[in-house]
């Protein structure tokens, strides 16, 4: 039941569900990036942190299950085994969950946010 990138309301509803679930499960430093008009990989990207490998894996597992049970979205998941970094692809929204050290190393937000945009943590 995922829409194609650019369908607006479907991707925004998915984004809202993702942000709510991550906040409810105590993800840290949640950043939302609007990708519309920048790439065809999705409409939004969400980047957040978990405090440990266990929390990163648990956040990913809970999010994937909630999206499947409540929205009928089957997500593609990469990296959950190690727990340093997990990518969840819903079709409309790409979610990256990192341990803080790994997030600092990759700095994905800097790649996708407009030039001059300050990150607030």
Image (cartoon, rainbow, N blue to C red):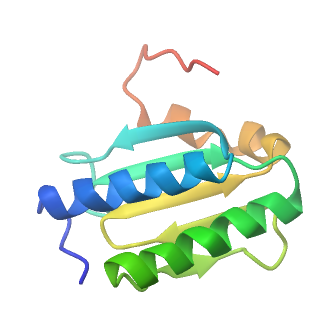
In the rendered image, residue 46, in percent from the top left (x then y), is placed at 48, 49
Q: Nearer the viewer, residue 42 or 38?
A: 42
Name the quadrant containing residue 42: bottom left
In the picture, residue 80 is in which quadrant? bottom right
Q: Quadrant of the N terminus?
A: bottom left
Percent x, y for residue 82? 85, 73
Relative horizontal placement of residue 103, taking residue 89 as reference (left or right): right
Left or right of 100? Residue 97 is left
Give the image quarter of residue 112.
Answer: top left
Q: Is residue 94 left or right of residue 30?
A: left
How many tags in the picture?
Answer: 0
Q: Which quadrant of the figure contains the C terminus?
A: top right
Viewer-side residue, 37 vs 99: 99
Front residue of 121/112: it is 121
Q: Residue at x 68, y 46 (%)?
A: 26
Q: Is residue 4 left or right of residue 42?
A: left
- Residue at 59% x, 67% y: name it: 87
Task: Give the answer, above or below, for where 54 lies relative to 66.
Answer: above
Q: Position of residue 81 (x, y in %)?
A: 80, 79
Location of residue 25 with respect to 106 vertically, above or below: below
Query: Residue 90: x percent and y percent?
Result: 40, 72
Q: Residue at x 51, y 59 (%)?
A: 95
Tell me what residue is drawn at x 66 percent, y 75 percent.
61
């Amino acid at each position: 039941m995922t829409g194609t990138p650019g369908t607006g309301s479907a991707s925004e509803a998915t984004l809202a569900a993702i942000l709510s679930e991550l906040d409810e499960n105590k993800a840290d430093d949640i950043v939302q990036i609007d990708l519309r008009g920048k790439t065809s990989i999705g409409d939004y990207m969400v980047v957040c942190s978990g405090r440990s490998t266990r929390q990163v894996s648990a956040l990913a597992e809970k999010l994937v299950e909630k999206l499947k049970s409540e929205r009928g979205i089957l997500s593609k998941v990469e990296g959950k085994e190690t727990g340093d970094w997990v990518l969840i692809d819903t079709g409309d929204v790409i979610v990256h969950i990192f341990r803080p050290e790994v997030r600092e190393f990759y700095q994905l937000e800097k790649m996708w946010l407009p030039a001059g945009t300050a990150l607030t943590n």
